[in-house]
Image (cartoon, helix red, strand yellow):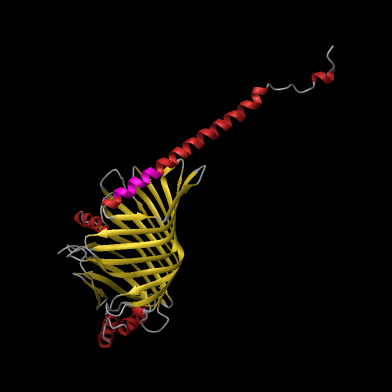
Amino acid sequence: MTSLFSSMRPRKKPAWRIVAPLILVLLLAAGWSVYWMTASTKAMVFIDQVLAREQEKGLVISCADRSIGGYPFKFLLDCTGLKIVDQTPSGQISLTASRLVVVVRAYDYNHMIGELYGPFELTTGRKRATDGKIVDVRRIFSGNAGTVTSSLILENQVLKETTLVIRDLTGTLVDYSNPNTPQDIATDLKEAVVNIRTTSDISEPIGDYEAAGVVKGLSLVGGAANIQSDKGARLDDAAMRVNLSNAPYQLAGQALDWLKVWKANDGEARISEFNATSGALKLKGKGQFKLDNLGRVQGVLKTRMIGLDVVINELVASGKIREKDAELGLAAISLLGNANANGVKIALRANKGKVYFGPFKIAKLKPLFDQ
């Protein structure tokens, strides 16, 4: 006769019910490991193929040392001693950085995140027509610190969205406005964020983009940036939102080729938001721009500004406008009744290669396209 206590004892589970889940987990782990190793090897082969293809087009990307890691759920490409050289018909542009890290999730190849670490150096050189040798190499920027992070989202191998973030960047820009005496400009940037995304069907060859950007704490001291004092130029913050119409989604070649296609499709940039603050200066505006047949910007940005006198004084101090012209221009603005408690209405216009700030001509634009 079975006692009450014996009937209450827990029944033992068969051994296979305990071992089977463990074996299954081990098999899955082993299978995933094989997949990761195979995929990482293929990734390195694919990267080499892409680099070789780009090198044929004139873009050379090299690393002093390169490795891949990130097991088990991502692929992490680590490149130290990065050097990028872009050969163009007229010369070359090169960028060096201490390290580049690119991360791709093992289960989603359409989202890539890259981070670039300083110090950086950006240079340009002119190609001599006689023998193709690069001469007149100029340092454009050298950065001592900071990081540059980029996020890329693809769809059917077409860029769907990208975000670029620059933080705590310090370094030196070089001002070549006077080629005989280039001057250094000390540069400090707290943060800059730019997001570009497609807003229409990317199955079509052309469509629309939206670009939004924010800049915080930009300081430039030295060279042409020193207008009135040794404090240089300062931008506390700025925000802009731009919509690009009739822009190509995918195009092999140089950035200039992209601009030419955009121009050929009658592309337009519509600025729906622009706000900037620099000390007592405040600026808000909207406008639209296109490219003319020479690749020069043409259009208008209608603004309302608080602190116009500050800008005019800086333009006079830098020699861009004469003091007498400044007085006449301010008088004309006052007579037109554009000023009130909310600031002064004034337009920034670009037309036929010349840039006007209200009644003042402040700059000339060089053609981007061959004449």
From the viewer's side, name the closer residue of 362 and 99.
99
Residue in the picture at 34% in, 49% down: 159
Main SS class of the magenta portion in the image: helix
In this view of the protein, which residue sits in the foreground, 170 or 239?
A: 170
> Residue 127 or 5: which is nearer the viewer?
127
Q: Where on the picture, by quarter, is residue 49?
A: top left
* Front in this rendered view, residue 363 or 64: 64
Q: Is residue 78 visible?
A: yes
Left or right position of 291 against 78: left
Residue 362 placed where, x, y %?
Answer: 26, 77
Quadrant for the C terminus in the image: bottom left
Image coords of residue 223 (percent x, y) = 35, 79
Residue 49 is inside the magenta segment: yes
Residue sitting farthest toward the bottom:
324
Q: Position of residue 308 (x, y in %)?
A: 35, 79
- Position of 38 relative to 103 (above/below): above
Q: Where residue 132 appears, x then y in whole percent?
A: 21, 62
* Tally of numbered tags: 0
In the picture, which quadrant includes the N terminus? top right
Judge whether residue 102 can be spotted in this image.
Answer: no
To which quarter of the image does residue 353 belong? bottom left
Residue closest to the far left: 371
Q: Which residues are magenta?
A: 44-53
What residue is at 37 percent from the left and 72 percent from the top?
173
Q: Residue furthest top?
A: 1
Instruction: Give above or below for 28 relative to 242.
Output: above
- With 154 as the anchor, is 246 left or right in this view? left
Height in image: 341 above or below 33? below
On whether residue 280 falls in the magenta region, the answer is no
